Every structure is written in structure tokens, then in C-alpha cells.
Amino acid sequence: MATMKIKKGDTVRVIAGSEAAGGNKVEGKVLSVDVKKHRVVVEGVNKVTKHQKPSMQNQNGGRVEIEAPIDISNVMLVHDGKPTRVGFKIEDGKKVRVAKATGKVIKD
């Protein structure tokens, strides 16, 4: 399986879908990555309302807003304030991510 170009903790910009409609530049931090389904959960993006039954953690239950996953192809990594594609290169015997726009190594 290919290496994922976006990792947990990266800042990404939504480039497609309802969040990007009308030229909005919505950015957020990646909260989780699902490698098998090629989906990411981004902070503050694709919010859905979920109904929860009362439990020990949430005594009242009710409606809770959570972020739902979106396809990884709909986001683009932001490096040095610019959205960029990601490539790979071998440096000192290690595989590192490289920003295509600047050519700089992306620190993990």
C-alpha cells in the first residue's frame, strides 16, 4: 500500500465539496486519518449533528455536533501558508515528505 501524504496533525485546506463552495478557504488541523478508506477528519469541517442516548459520560444525552470524515482527495496540505502537493524523497537513508511548491522538506 502506498504511503499516505497527509498525516495526523497536518494543517490542510479543503479544495472540494460543500465546505469549499463559493471560494471559501477553509483550513483546519487533521484529527485522524483512515488509511483503508482514504478519509480524514478535519477540525471544524463537515460538521454533522448526532443524536446520543443518555450515558454515564453524557447524563442528558441529546444532539451533539461532531466532525465527519471527508475524502482525502478533497484536502490539500498547507506548508508555509500555501497549499501544496506532496512528494517523497530519500534523505540520509530516510524517506521524507517534500512540498512540491517550495521543494522544502516537511517536518513531521
Image (cartoon, helix red, strand yellow):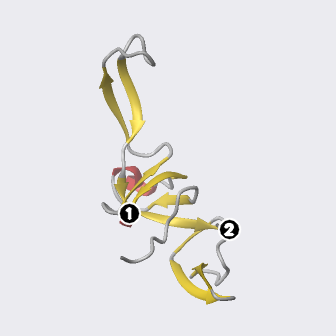
Q: Earlier in the sequence, mark 1 or mark 2?
A: 1
| Above or below, 45 relative to 23 | above
User: Picture quarter containing residue 93?
Assistant: bottom right
**Image point 32% across, 63% down: which residue?**
36
Task: Please name the residue that numbered disc 1 is placed on.
Answer: 35
- Left or right of residue 104, residue 56 in this image: left
- Left or right of residue 15, residue 96 in this image: right
Q: Amino acid at mark 2?
A: Asp
User: Picture quarter containing residue 102?
Assistant: bottom right
| Above or below, 22 relative to 46 | below
| Above or below, 50 relative to 84 | above
Foreground pick, 108 / 104: 108
Crowd class of label 2 (few under 14; some 14 to 19; many from 20; radius 10 Å): few
**Image point 44% across, 46% down: which residue?**
45
Mark 2, secondary structure of its residue? loop
| Above or below, 66 relative to 91 | above
Mark 1, secondary structure of its residue? loop
Position of residue 94 measured from the top left corner of the image (x, y, whole percent): 62, 83
Q: Amino acid at mark 1?
A: Val
Q: Nearer the viewer, mark 1 or mark 2?
A: 1
**Image point 36% across, 76% down: which residue?**
1
Task: Please name the residue that numbered disc 2 is placed on.
Answer: 80
Labels 1 & 2 near each other (Cβ < 8 A): no
User: Picture quarter containing residue 100?
Assistant: bottom right
**Image point 38% across, 63% down: which residue?**
35
Disc 1/disc 2 C-alpha distance (Å): 25 Å
Crowd class of label 1 (few under 14; some 14 to 19; many from 20; radius 10 Å): some
Foreground pick, 1 / 68: 1
Position of residue 91 measured from the top left corner of the image (x, y, whole percent): 66, 88
Foreground pick, 91 / 42: 91
Position of residue 98 measured from the top left corner of the image (x, y, whole percent): 60, 80
Position of residue 3 measured from the top left corner of the image (x, y, whole percent): 45, 75
